[in-house]
Amino acid sequence: MSPRSNDSTRGSGQEATPPAGAPPAAETPRPPSAAGRVDALRRFAAAARRGRGPHLASCAVLLAVAMTAGAVAVGGDGRDAARAVPGVSRAVSADVLVRGDLDTAIRSLQTHVRQQPRDFGAWAALGFAQVERARTDGDPSRYTRAERALARSLALRPGNDQALAGQAALAAARHDFAAALDHADRALERNPYSERALCSRIDALVELGRYAEAAKAAAVADRRRPGVPVFTRYAYVRELRGDVRTARRVLHRALDSAAGPADVAYVATALGNLERGQGRYDTALRHYARALAADDAYLPALEGRARAQAADGDRAGAITTLEQVVARSPLPGPLVALGELYEDRGDRAKAREQYALVDAWTALARAGGVDVDLDTALAAADHGDTAEALRAARAAWDRRRTVHTADALAWALHRAGRSAEALPYARRATATGYRDAAFLHHRGMIEKAAGQDRAARASLTAALRLNPGFSPLGARAARAALEGLEAAR
């Protein structure tokens, strides 16, 4: 699992759902390409800079239409029907489908539910596949389509575990982790061996900051359904507790057991992210190369490679790679990373455009029912409105007390000039043993501002030793602060 990787339309998703057995809506014209969606996002960002409040909300609705442009109401993406593959079997599961080509799986399921509209399992699989696709293409409107498909499945077969597990995944994707945990538990009551529900339960507990319970859930999942999805989550739970050695070993085990290109790309990328976080850039780049050899279009691997290139000094290569990523999937993480690389080379106009796109994406995601407070806090603290960063960070912390929300709140408080208040949160972010150079950098800068020079030197030194290229701007700021502290001794 890789977190590195956030309101109202959560839960069952019954709104606007046709009656069980009703014929699906007909396809309408093809939606825009990835480039078209990014262009729509840019237009919205420009409009958003000229207005706020209700105007911004209405723009988000218009953007959602532009981003989807006629997708079928039951979850279709409007692509050429001639490319659809034959309908899938009633028995096929979402877990199997999403390990292959998601676009092919979605088209196949769309064809199948038109032919067999009462197949509750296919509706559940379609809903889950749409959730997984949204994770990679950055289109939050897919969540509404997933919601409708899952609701149709439950209307046809109330309480079926496939749809409940899909709802857990959907709630987690929208960052409603309390709901995700509830749906996962309900699914496991009906099927204790549901891989998707077991995985969503781990995800929810992790993102609620309940790490001891997440470790137990990972152990249970490993006994019941050992395999790539469980192994990667088990590894991340160990990493959060500072056990990088075990995390690495488990991920290698997962890679050895990977059955197809999608699994290889997923696990090799997770290994690349782990090694990059430890400052092992050459090793990370080898893992990303393996991921891209399995799937040359796998965006998380491309993003990871770009970050490793930047950390290793190849800023031009990193920019080229990230431009490819954001052209297809304008998510906050790669947008901010690209903006910082532009800023680092002195191109502030291009940097501002990327940060504006982050604002546009978060508005669209919020309109689609996604909790984006953590994304907002992290981006706004460094590149936006510090008051908004603090509001968002407090809201995220109130809902889930994780190392990531602790770090976000600490940094937002510091950027708002409240470093003494920030310090306990910065310490909490590093208390589990999780080693992240950005967290250590934030803690060091907060300690410096709070007058704790000795602690600041230790934290900043640790950040740069762990991962000296963790961020083009952050690493430069950490080095400058450390030089200033050394000169003052």
Image: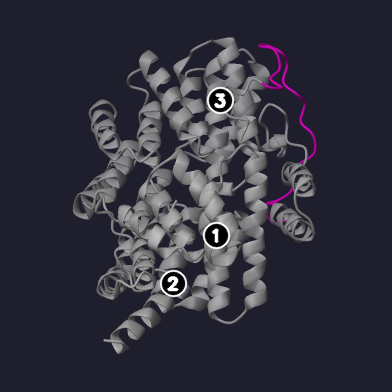
Count the numbered circles shown.
3
Type of residue at label 2?
A: Gly
Q: Tell me whether the residue at label 1 lies in contact with that at label 3, contact meaning CB atoms closer than 8 angstroms.
A: no
What secondary structure is found at the residue carrying circle 1? helix
Rounded to the nearest whole Å, what is the CA distance between mark 1 and mark 3?
Answer: 28 Å
Region in magenta: 15-35
In the rendering, at what x and y percent does residue 441 appear? 36, 68
Q: Depth check: give the residue in front, 448 or 227.
A: 448
Vertical position of residue 64 compared to residue 269: above or below: above
Q: Depth check: give the residue in front, 419 or 335.
A: 419
In the rendering, at what x and y percent does residue 173 appear? 51, 38
Type of residue at label 1?
A: Ala
In the rendering, at what x and y percent does residue 449 appear? 39, 72
Res. 94 visible in picture: no
Horizontal side, residue 397 vs residue 192: left or right: right
Rounded to the nearest whole Å, what is the CA distance between mark 2 and mark 3?
Answer: 38 Å
Q: Earlier in the sequence, mark 1 or mark 3?
A: 3
Horizontal side, residue 372 vs residue 59: left or right: left
Alpha-carbon neighbours of circle 3 within 10 Å: few (<14), some, or many (≥20)?
A: some
Question: What residue does disc 2 label?
Answer: 474
The residue positioned 29% from the left and 75% from the top of the image is 453
Rounded to the nearest whole Å, what is the CA distance between mark 2 and mark 1?
Answer: 13 Å
Question: What residue does disc 1 label?
Answer: 379
Vertical position of residue 458 compared to residue 56: above or below: below
What mark, if any, has residue 11 been given in the picture?
3
In the rendering, at what x and y percent does residue 104 appear? 58, 37
